[in-house]
Image (cartoon, grey):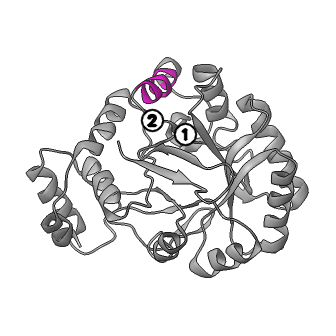
Amino acid sequence: MSTITIAQHSAHPLTVNRLGYGTMRLTGPEIWGEPADRPQALAILKKAVESGVNFLDTADYYGEDVTNRLIAEALHPYPADLVICTKVGATRRPDKSWVSFNPPENLRTSIDNNLRTLKREQIQLVHLRLMGHGAVPLEEQLGAMFELQREGKILHVGLSNVNRAELEAGLKLGEIATVENMYGYAQRTSLSAPYGETRGGEEVLPLCEQHGIPLIPFFSLVHGLPNAGNKLAEIARKHHATEAQLNIAWLLHKSPWILPIPGTSSLAHLEENLKAADIKLSAEDMAYLG
């Protein structure tokens, strides 16, 4: 795999292999509760790291706390080069709904919970997920994150689910290490979700490239573009690959500043996803895909 550097201009840059793993699908139905096959969930985490994945994406509101506890059980004590990224700014209700959890005191509670469940003294990268138009201004949310960073609980601060204006505002407030937005070949722009608008990656990618900020996409194979599925399937057949693999390959070829984190609850699908890093798309392939 190629590599990418997070916070390249900081005193503590993090260089990781350019295909990570998103843990969200390791939970039960509706991103809630324990996995249906716990031994396989633990095996997936171990296999990912053994295969060269050294960037994991998680959140304490996956489960709740399920993915964090699985990561710690499978991998602690952690390899020296493993980067674990979590998210704060949201929480889950008992009815499984998603709600904002972004006042400064709540962000601190979330960070402390992540530190406890991940068994870490410092979290290397934390994304502040923006949840709709809450009452807490971005300046207060990010101010709390930067205060936790000064205290040493966070090494680097990122943003998640942001549009271009919000990213520009964040960059004026401090160093933004990464951006995590929904992004995939066929789903590039914002869409409505049960917990508010989900922001796409297309509008923030140029700004990320300009500032050397990795864009971490949680991708979707929703056919949101005209004829997207037909083209993706055609190029997939050409490369003897699946459409999911082509989606990952397209992200890797789209920009060197993209760090895909495809997730799965299947060991077989994990191995398929990892093979996507070996697919070489030509300039003609990329032009045809658009």
- Whether residue 111 sits left or right of residue 1 in the image: it is right
**Amino acid type at image mark 1:** Leu
In the orientation shown, which residue stands out farthest toward the left?
Answer: 238
Residue 265 found in image quarter: top left
Identify the main secondary structure in magenta. Answer: helix
Q: Is residue 118 above or below residue 99?
A: above
Residue at position x 84%, y 66% in the image: 143
Residue furthest right in the image:
105
- Identify the residue at the far top of this view: 39
Q: Amino acid at mark 2?
A: Val
Q: Could you tell me residue 96's position as x and y percent?
A: 67, 47
Q: Dot 1: what SS? A: strand
**What residue is disc 2 on?**
53
Tell me which residue sits at (66%, 33%) in the image: 68
Q: Is residue 289 magenta?
A: no
200 or 38, which lies in front?
200
Pointers 2 and 1 in contact (C-beta within 8 Å) = yes
Quadrant housing the C terminus: bottom left
Query: Where residue 19 appears, x then y in whole percent?
Result: 41, 44
Q: Is residue 195 left or right of residue 209?
A: right
Q: Specify the label residue 56 is tagged with.
A: 1
In the image, is 103 to the left or to the right of 123?
Answer: right
Q: Residue at x 56, y 33 (%)?
A: 81
Q: Position of residue 77 (x, y in %)?
A: 65, 20
- Magenta segment boundaries in residue numbering: 41-50
Q: Quadrant of the N terminus?
A: top left
